Amino acid sequence: MNCRSEVLEVSVEGRQVDEAMLALLHTILLHRSTGKFHYKKEGTYSIGTVGTQDIDCDFIDFTFVRVSSEELDRVIRKAVGEFKDALSNTGSDGMGQISLEFYQKKKSRWPFSDECIPWEVWSIKVNVVNLANEQERQICREKVGEKLGEKVINIVEVINRHEYLPKMPTQSEVDNVFDTSLKDVQPYLHKITFQITDSLGTSVSTTMRRLIKDTLAL
């Protein structure tokens, strides 16, 4: 099985990191989650509903939609918080990548552990820029909102392609495909990881600085 890989790249101010990451990760998981499965007998089941919630950002002119699950939100916020803290330790400017990997389990014979086979990975490259004043921060607030809107459209377009998804499992195999630990939603099995680099990514951060400079010149 070939694993799909998608890369998104954003440039943000330090205080915007968590909101930008939450917006993108929640958007992906909104489309990679189902309601809870209710099995009547093996091979026969109904699927519960998934509620949604609009979230307004405080430091970005942007509103995103997420699954209405406090449990899922806590898991994502914890990972994003750790990523933001690690980025902060690099100084005012930094670069990192946070990845959301979807996988399914393949049962192995004892004494070997189950094999985790990834089928889709989303990598978000993040450049943190240091701005000079409140005027630049206000422009960045607007520009990052516009860029996030473009990224969300891109995510939806990718997800709407007719490509591989794990087949709907029987009751005995549901834990090989979905995370059943949450009481109000059932996302595909996934994990969030991140890595930090000390050098600033020039392309995206330079583009953001140019956008701010051009807007100030108007």
Image (cartoon, grey):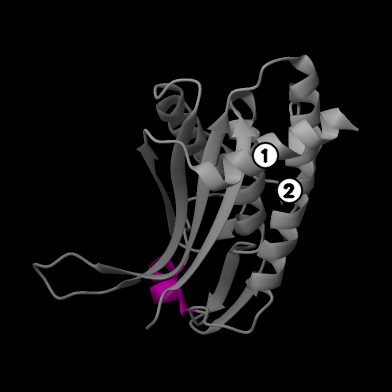
Q: Where is residue 108 in the image (x, y as percent from the top left)?
A: 19, 74
SS label for mark 1: helix
**Does any portion of residue 60 appear in the rendered image?**
no
Q: Does the magenta stretch include residue 135?
A: no
**Which numbered dot is residue 133?**
none
Among the 4 quarters of the image, the one containing residue 114:
bottom left
Task: Out of 78 and 99, give the one closest to the viewer.
Answer: 99
The residue most toward the front is: 217
Q: Nearer the viewer, mark 2 or mark 1?
A: 1
Placement of the N terminus among the 4 image quadrants: bottom left
Mark 2 lies on residue: 147
**SS at mark 2?**
helix
Q: In this picture, is 23 found above or below 214?
A: below
Along the line of sight, which residue is nearer the eye, 178 or 37?
178
Position of residue 12 measured from the top left corner of the image (x, y, whole percent): 63, 35
Which numbered dot is residue 208?
1
Residue 15 percent across, percent down from the top left:
62, 24
Q: Which amino acid does label 1 sit on?
A: Met
Taking the spot 64% from the left edge, 30% from the top edge, the residue there is 16
Q: What residue type is labelled 2?
A: Lys
